[in-house]
Image: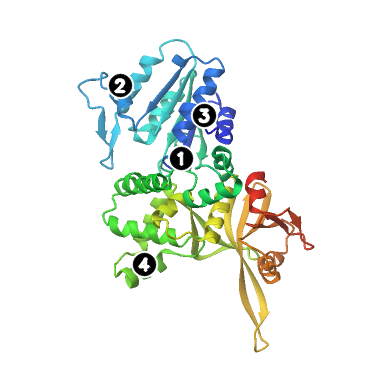
Amino acid sequence: MEIKREKYLTEIIERKNNKLIKVITGLRRSGKSYLLNKLYKSYLLEHNILDSQIITFAFDNLEDVMKLDKYMPNEPTLIYDSKNNYVVNSKKFILYISDLTKENKDYYLLLDEIQLLDNFVLVLNGLLSHDNFDIYVTGSNSKMLSKDIITEFRGRGDQIHIYPLSFKEYYESSNLSFEEAYLEYQYYGGMPYLINLVSDERKQEYLKQLFSEIYIKDITERNRIKDIESFEKLLCVLSSSIGSYTNPTNLEKTFKSVENVVYGHVAIKNHIEYIKNAFLISEAKRYDIKGRKYIGSNSKYYFTDIGLRNALTNFRQNEPTHIMENIIYNELIIRGYSVDVGIVEINIKNENGNYVSKQLETDFICNKLNEKIYIQSAYSMESLDKQNQEKRSLLNIKDNFRKMIIVKDNFKKYITEEGIEVISLKEWLLGGE
């Protein structure tokens, strides 16, 4: 089944022949290669680009790498980089590209997992000097392909980040009702290959294998993590605490008291960064709305794909409220918002008649250019008390930006007398607001 990924395909098409290196990043197995080598290549062929003008190369594919063996036969095709990891010999690759681009034509270079090429920044900058080369690359590690790397491209890098399937993409590919699709999505997430799998056993097995054979191995080997057992437990702790505040110091105490393991907060902080760099999780920081500043060291961590999170818990912690919150967070990120957790400080009178300070939480502060939205995630708002509880923090935000409550229940969107939009999860996910 072909999943169109129209949002990302459009982003690539808009950048065609813009004289920049198109850098497509994202979680492993999230569909970067499919987007580039299947969807975009098909687009080029349909628009009168010859197959000989499209050069595809995957640096994690042995068949492609073996094509380089005939160049400079006295030199190895795979060499060690500065971190003692195997990478592809860039001199051989340059000769290979030169061999395929001798004619006076425009060429489209679609290069997969570019971080596995030795000195790839220098190589790409060199290739970009050819006026007839339009270059597209993918990478699975944000530390290797981040704003710093874009800078190293000397202002000639253009980043496109791809995510696992949004709920709408999953729903439109599934031939299921909304409720059936959401039930599957909140359990198995949006990794594209899942569309091909039918049984629950195969889906669970696939997600577990992704973690054990790809993500954990990739992160621990790249960053030379020796205590893999503690690292795996850290992943499990983070997966069990989505929607909850945590920080490295508290995690250090948890490991010491619960696991009787010495796992320092500095190491934990570094390891969380490695997990973020692999695009497995995102961090939402606490933001004081009235004070207009970030506060404290506590953050919330959300998994880029909820199915991968569930695989870490062995599919045993299916809390619908926290999972819905994670799905909304991911959808906001996909739609291009930067997202923080909002804190509103108010003064209330206690039982002694004295005023004390209390912090109310707004689930998400969403910013995009000049647009700002405050959002509460509510699994249900059946009672009046629950409605007032969800509105309370929003009503204490005194600016005029949009305020919204997203509710799992199915109903027609309405606006409260205070101006708060209340919308069903179904309408919000499928409407693309």
Q: How crowded is mark 4: few (under 14 residues within 10 Å), some or many (20 or more)?
A: many
Say whether residue 432 is visible: no
Residue that badge 3 annotates: 20
Residue type indicated by callout 3? Leu
Q: Residue furthest right?
A: 417
**Taking 203 as reference, is 261 above or below it?**
below
Query: Gap between marks 3 and 2, in whole Å?
Result: 27 Å
Q: Please tell me in which quadrant of the rendered image residue 406 appears.
A: bottom right
Q: Are marks 4 and 3 in contact (CB under 8 Å)?
A: no
Q: Which is more N-terminal, label 2 or label 1?
A: 1
Task: Report which residue position mark 1 lands on.
Answer: 30
Q: What residue type is labelled 2?
A: Lys
Q: Residue tagged by mark 4?
A: 252
Mark nearest the camera among 4 and 3 is 4
Return the mark for residue 92.
Answer: none
Helix, strand or loop at disc 2? loop
- Nearer the viewer's eye, disc 4 or disc 1? 1
Could you tell which of marks 4 and 1 lies nearer the N-terminus? 1
Give the left or right position of residue 217, taking residue 45 as reference: left
Of callouts 4 and 3, which one flags the residue occurring earlier in the amino acid sequence? 3
Disc 3 secondary structure class = loop
* 11 sits left or right of 58 in the view: right
| Extreme residue toward the front, this view | 199
Q: Position of residue 169 (x, y in %)?
A: 56, 40
Instruction: Give SS at disc 1.
Output: loop
From the image, tell me which residue sits under label 2: 67
